Amino acid sequence: MTPLLEVDNLATGYGQSKVLRGVSFSVKPGEVACIMGRNGAGKTTLLRALMGVLAKTGSVRLAGEDITHWAGHRVNAAGMVWVPQEDSVFSGLTVRNHLTIAVHGRREEEEGLEAAGALFPVLGERLEQEAQTLSGGERKMLALAQALIVRPKVVLMDEPTEGVAPVVVEQLIPAIAASTKESAVVLVEQNIDTALALGQNAYLLEQGSIAVSGTVRDLHDRGVLEQRLAL
Amino acid sequence: MILGFLPVDSFNVIVLAAVFVLVATGLHFTFGMLNVVNLVHGELILIGAYTTLQVQRTTGNVLLGMALAPLAAGIVGVAMERGVLRFLYDRPLDSLLATFGLSVIIRQVVQFVFSPNPQIVRSPIGGSFLLGGFNIPWWRLIIVLVTSVLLVGVIQFLQRSRFGLHARATVANPLLAETMGINSGAMRAGLFALGSAIAGLAGAMLAPISTLNPQFGLLFLVNSFLVVIIGGKGSLRGLVVAGIVLGGTLAALQFVMSTVMAQILILAIAIIGVRVRPLLGLLREWRGRRPLGSAV
Ligand SMILES: Nc1ncnc2c1ncn2[C@@H]1O[C@H](COP(=O)(O)OP(=O)(O)OP(=O)(O)O)[C@@H](O)[C@H]1O
Ligand SMILES: [Mg+2]
């Protein structure tokens, strides 16, 4: 099966400060690739670069198409969606507004709203609430719903379970797994249990590039994750 | 000084309120929403007025001029945004300097082409009628009506249309908007074009009730900023209230004092207004403060 996402020799950073270099990996449909690394390793930076909102060199292919130099809105339109780690809502806009923007041009609005409500019932009950007044966990659910209801080709998720209660994580995991069966998922995750539950291959970022890769299960069994992440 | 050309009667309280709202509405887009300290706003009004004048001269049709005025101002506005201002959204001081420079250039060009002499734009609908003892000029009534319709339209458009939704998202967080499929650059250009076009319309509407010269736009700049800022920058409803209060007060004050004195008093009210507003905001924040630990 050809990969949906192919990243080759990617380098990026902020102005003079280089954060990543020589990053290469690919993700097939139905696969969840875990990006791991300590705080500040560049995980969020990698997702920003893939999403087209941070300048980069190297090459990024989405379903075979070269999207390296595309602007963010084109990358999104081509089927790549992003669940940000923070700042995931527009202030002043309601939950319904957010979902409307997410499904624009992809699905019927009502259908999208129903799908979001089916994934996370709390969203269906709070459609008219301003999104910035949602609780932290609810905001995560909104960000996830926005990404998952559009049948994306590639989903970039930045610590979707960070700060979410373990009981809720238990609900999130099957929801994520069920909605991404045909997508390629790039999951930034610090929590090993979540990584084990969802992920196949893991890539460990250190010093700006991938230091170790392998299956999550294998790296976990050999204690590599625990050691490298200093858990 | 400003708008002293309006004779004093109580209908003018309404007219001046409408004028204040009309000139500030365009600035709501460029400054209120896009955060550009848009010192070229007055010259966009000027372009609207002189476009009307030029079309009146060449075709004899003032209404056609008024229809083309928003188009001309909108095109100039979007050219400035794409050409210069879009690179300066994160650099407010440079952006302020750029709009100041552009305003001087446009004023000079207008002066060069049309001379510094005062010009007259004909009112498309002249005459007046009597209502309850007041003499009401048709054109001034139309200014009030057009302003009301424009406002209802703009509020509906921003709240209900797809463009409005995407624009509000872009203004709230351009990077997030981009990753959700919104072409944030195009949205900003669109907002700037709209604000400029509305400024052009204001210039066209107001040209017949004043004498036109290259300083025409400057007259409206300060009051437009006052209205947008006191209205709570970014809030159209606040803008309407501020416009009605400031414009209405200015007109009312003209009953009892000179126009210059009235304008000075308005400025004083405005300064007190901006001094008090943040206090009110703080008060509200303090009252609504969440219990410790739940602050996000
Ligand atoms: N906007 C920015 N401008 C300049 N430097 C930045 C910016 N954002 C991040 N950095 C720097 O880039 C490096 C990588 O940051 P990044 O946010 O990608 O880390 P991360 O792996 O996601 O960390 P965490 O686990 O804490 O989320 C850090 O050293 C950070 O200080
Ligand atoms: Mg991060």
Image: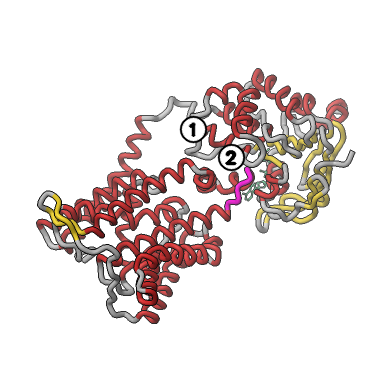
Q: Which residues are magenta?
A: B180-184
Element type where label 1 sits in the image: loop
- Comparing marks 1 and 2, which lies closer to the viewer? 2
Q: How is the image coloured?
A: secondary structure
Q: Residue at x 49, y 54 (%)?
A: B191
Question: What amino acid is found at the position of numbered circle 1 in the picture?
Answer: Glu
**Residue labelled with disc 1:** A130
Q: Earlier in the sequence, mark 1 or mark 2?
A: 2
- Image quadrant for the N terminus of chain B? bottom left
- The amino acid beneath tag 2 is Ile
Indicate the position of residue A118 as horizontal and vertical percent values. 64, 23
Quadrant of the image where one finds ligand 1: top right
Q: Is residue A23 visible?
A: no
Q: Position of residue B267 (x, y in %)?
A: 24, 56
Q: Is residue B183 magenta?
A: yes
| Chain bearing mark 1 | A
SS under mark 2: helix
Residue A220 falls in which quadrant of the image?
top right
- Closer-to-camera residue (B73/B109): B73
Location of residue B55 in the rendering, given as x and y in whole percent from the top left corner: 39, 72
Nearer the observer, B5 or B238: B5
Few, some or many residues within 10 Å of mark 1 (<14, 14–19, 20+): some
Q: Which residue is mark 2?
A: A101
Residue B124 included in the magenta stretch of the image: no
* Residue B112 vertical position relative to residue B182 in the rendered view, above or below: below
Q: Residue at x 32, y 47 (%)?
A: B240
